[in-house]
Amino acid sequence: MQPCRICNNSENNTEYLVNEMLFGTREKFKYFKCGKCGCLQIAHMPMDMSHYYPPEYNAFNKKSKYRNKSSLIRNKLRHIWKKAYIDRHMMPNKLLINFLGKPGLPEWIIRTGITTNSRILDIGCGDGSLLFQMREMGFKNLTGVDRYINFENVQYKRIKFFNKDISALSYSAKPAFDLVMLHHSFEHMRGQFETLNHIKNLLSDHGSVVIRIPVVPSFAWRKYGTNWFALDAPRHFFLHTEHSMQLVAEKTGFTIMNRYCDASPQTLWASEQYTKNIPFMDDRSLRFGLDKSIFTKKDLEGFVAKAQELNKSQDGDTACFILKKK
Ligand SMILES: [Zn+2]
């Protein structure tokens, strides 16, 4: 049997056949779960993946319709509040935060302790939407790389974008970053060890790496199996366990400082759709609104509550790992 790419074990591996269901081509891909480290991985990585990332793929990353639409002014004020919190080590901000309290911010911003002056690299930045949001929060030094972006090496709204592999970036620029982040991109990468080795060369000595990925075992994997949305065959090559992530980190000179679950309701309702043979990009998918979907508003509330409960009990199907150099 094929050896695990993380721990090299080839005993007691379990095989699965998974359909492409994001676009609904239903092309079949073989996966296997390592009997030792538990990492679930694709058996054969297709040579040319560009075919599986059509232009519509980036649209999939766009914000859901279910976000609150708040006014521009309210948004602006919220960003000022966030910026003050991020730079709360500075005196006037400290007073403001004592008065206003903590704004709603992603946990990884809080836990890494970055400031708006931190040098930040987003690997697999897609259309750059997260970087644009961070720019609004006041972050000044932002860089994004993605092999599948349509824009060439450009600077837009003072954010640098590179349409290249991170290995190429390390040779051309050699900048030191205080935070390197991979939001749902690490699972798409062929070389897990090579990727972290490249990141090590790009990271300042006290810098942090944020890796947000789907994880097993988790409630959604146990419940939905090969219909689990986050398997996303064949784009997701690796679905890590905490143990297999630890092996990759250790072997590349990193320590996992922090881990928490950050699952969203989307993986639950999309998995539910897959069990009923409804692809994510289908007309009937909740992706395009409730009208044609198989769900009611109440179902949707149920998924939101379930995701929150799973994150609390650390059984969510996506997690954030924060790494530092040893
Ligand atoms: Zn293994």
Image (spheres, helix red, strand yellow):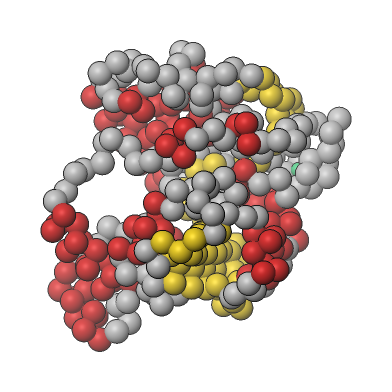
Ligand 1, by image quadrant, is top right
Q: Residue at x 60, y 49 (%)?
A: 147
Q: Residue at x 48, y 73 (%)?
A: 119
Q: Residue at x 73, y 33 (%)?
A: 46
Quarter of the image with the C terminus is bottom right
Of all residues shown, which one is farthest toward the top? 276
- 225 over 207 or under it: above or below: above
Residue 196 image-quadrant placement:
bottom right
Q: Please state the horizontal and vertical placement of residue 192, each as a whole percent of the image.
A: 70, 51
Q: Please state the horizontal and vertical placement of residue 253, each as a whole percent of the image.
A: 71, 67
Residue 130 image-quadrant placement:
bottom left
Q: Horizontally, is 23 left or right of 191 in the view? A: left
Q: Residue at x 26, y 73 (%)?
A: 84
Q: Horizontally, is 272 left or right of 195 in the view? A: left
Q: Horizontally, is 13 left or right of 158 in the view? A: right
Q: Viewer-proximal residue, 198 or 99?
A: 198
Quarter of the image with the N terminus is top right
Q: Please state the horizontal and vertical placement of residue 301, each as a whole percent of the image.
A: 27, 30
Q: Viewer-proximal residue, 179 or 101?
A: 179
Q: Horizontally, is 105 left or right of 244 in the view? A: left
Of all residues shown, which one is farthest toward the bottom? 91
